[in-house]
Image (tube, rainbow, N blue to C red):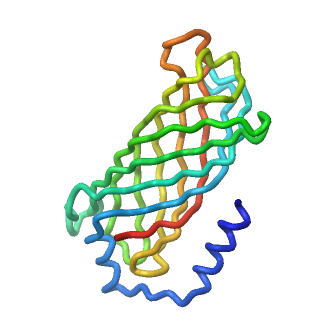
Amino acid sequence: MTRILLTIIVALVLVPATVSAADNAFVRDASHEYTWLAGYGVTHRDFGATRTDVQTFTNILRYGWFLSDEVGKGNWYQGRHELLLELPLHVAVNHDGRVMTGGYALGSWKFTSLEQMVPYVFAGGGVLFVDLGLPTMGTRLDFSYQGGTGLQYFIRKDLALTGEYRYHHVSNANTATPNEPLNSSLFTVGISLFR
């Protein structure tokens, strides 16, 4: 899967870029964003109450809906509000390929003042079905909160390469015992299409 993603990214980078300063207005006017992200996650043992090492291969399908026109023109914070809805699949590579899957809702701020790059920040949470076989988590129905930052580099006026880091927390929110959380870092790359 990673090899397929890298092949697609390399092919897109080799396609002559058609982005110009005038085209960059496209992201300022787009209504929707469709993204596929893939990457790697690892827990931080001894961070908070996390004791278990979990390494994941992560796939995320994302739909973004822009909630505002561009605001703050001429200021460092110039940008747009966006609601992100995600369908994640976290495959635990060091726990027999067991999975975590569910849904996330995130709020995002896209900084739109740069020519060909769009940095952004995001935060939110969701619900996960966790089938890692860890008795320390207490239940299979868990909750996640997360926050992070990313960068989109436009290779066409409607297509961007996306790189992202997020802090990712999973626990059962004390609905069962025991409740050992998984505090992780996730690093992902992918492709975003704007419409």
Q: Position of residue 91 (x, y in %)?
A: 68, 42
Q: Quadrant of the C terminus?
A: bottom left
Residue in the foreground of this view, choosing between 61 and 161: 61
Q: Is residue 165 left or right of residue 115?
A: right
Q: Residue at x 66, y 37 (%)?
A: 99
Instruction: State whether residue 14 is above or below residue 144.
Output: below
Instruction: State whether residue 89 is above or below residue 115.
Output: above
> For residue 184, what is the image quadrant?
top right
> For residue 3, what is the image quadrant?
bottom right
Q: Is residue 131 left or right of residue 162?
A: right
Instruction: State whether residue 40 is above or below residue 153.
Output: above
Q: Residue at x 44, y 35 (%)?
A: 126
Q: Position of residue 18 (x, y in %)?
A: 45, 88
Q: How many callouts does the rendering have?
A: 0
Q: Residue at x 71, y 34 (%)?
A: 54
Residue in the foreground of this view, choosing between 183 and 26: 26
Q: Position of residue 157 (x, y in %)?
A: 39, 80
Instruction: State whether residue 79 is above or below residue 166.
Output: below
Q: Is residue 164 left or right of residue 24?
A: right
Q: Quadrant of the N terminus?
A: bottom right
Residue in the foreground of this view, choosing between 69 and 72: 69
Q: Position of residue 84 (x, y in %)?
A: 38, 50
Residue in the foreground of this view, choosing between 87 and 156: 87
Q: Residue at x 58, y 9 (%)?
A: 177
